[in-house]
Image (spheres, helix red, strand yellow):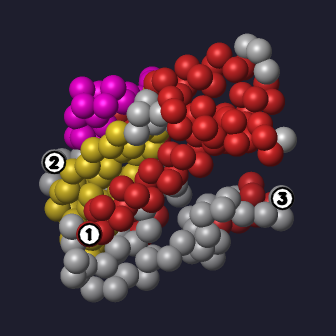
Amino acid sequence: MKQMVEACADQMVKMARPRWTSRALPISHQKEGVCLSSGLLLPGKDISSHLDGCHEVVLFCATLSSQVDQLIRQAESRDMLRALCLDCCATAAVEQLCDWVEEQIHAQYPQCYFPFRYSPGYGDLPLSVQGPFLSLLDAPRKLGLCASSSHILTPRKSVTALIGVASAPVSSAKRSCISCPAGDHCQYRKAGGHCGSA
């Protein structure tokens, strides 16, 4: 099994074409949620609470490219165990890419503070913001990254997220099960585990 994991990781790395883009926007807090200076409203109490104390957000998206999706699909038609292994390797890789992007963004604001990155679908921030989010980043043209009518990202191994920027320390700087908006509804906690983000 270890050999398969290593082989899948090597193959996935060779096929991946990691790319990302970002955009910083001032924000204002409103009753319905958080409004970006572009006019896009991020609705919900959770995102408003998460960005409390922030004066700006950096939107970003990252993708491993369609080649990785194709590699996984090809494996699904031949060997489901290998396909699952490739899928897990790709998921880990796109999270590592996001961690690296987050470091680059933090470096651009040396005197600032940041809550943890937050994605559409977290808490009560709906997935329906994916399309407008990608449009603001010009992601379809720059990266070939789009959202389907059901708000699923394509290529699949892609992430959209935002990072708040504050001039003073913020309470949501560290992710934990206690502060997570999923709370008692979390399927991982019900099963006695956690998502790995805490």
The residues tagged by marks 2 and 3 sit, at their Cα atoms, a distance apart of 41 Å
The residues tagged by marks 1 and 3 sit, at their Cα atoms, a distance apart of 37 Å
- Tag 3 residue: 191
- Marks 2 and 1: which is nearer the front? 1
**Which is nearer the eye, 164 or 158?**
158
Check contact, mark 2 vs mark 1: CB within 8 A.
no
As drawn, which residue projects farthest toward the top? 77
Q: Tell me, for residue 23, which label it has, or none.
A: none
Amino acid type, mark 3: Ala
- Marks 2 and 3: which is nearer the front? 3
Q: Quadrant of the C terminus?
A: bottom right
- Tag 2 residue: 38
Q: Quadrant of the N terminus?
A: top right
Amino acid type, mark 1: Ala
**Circle 1: element type:** helix
Q: Is residue 31 left or right of residue 45?
A: left
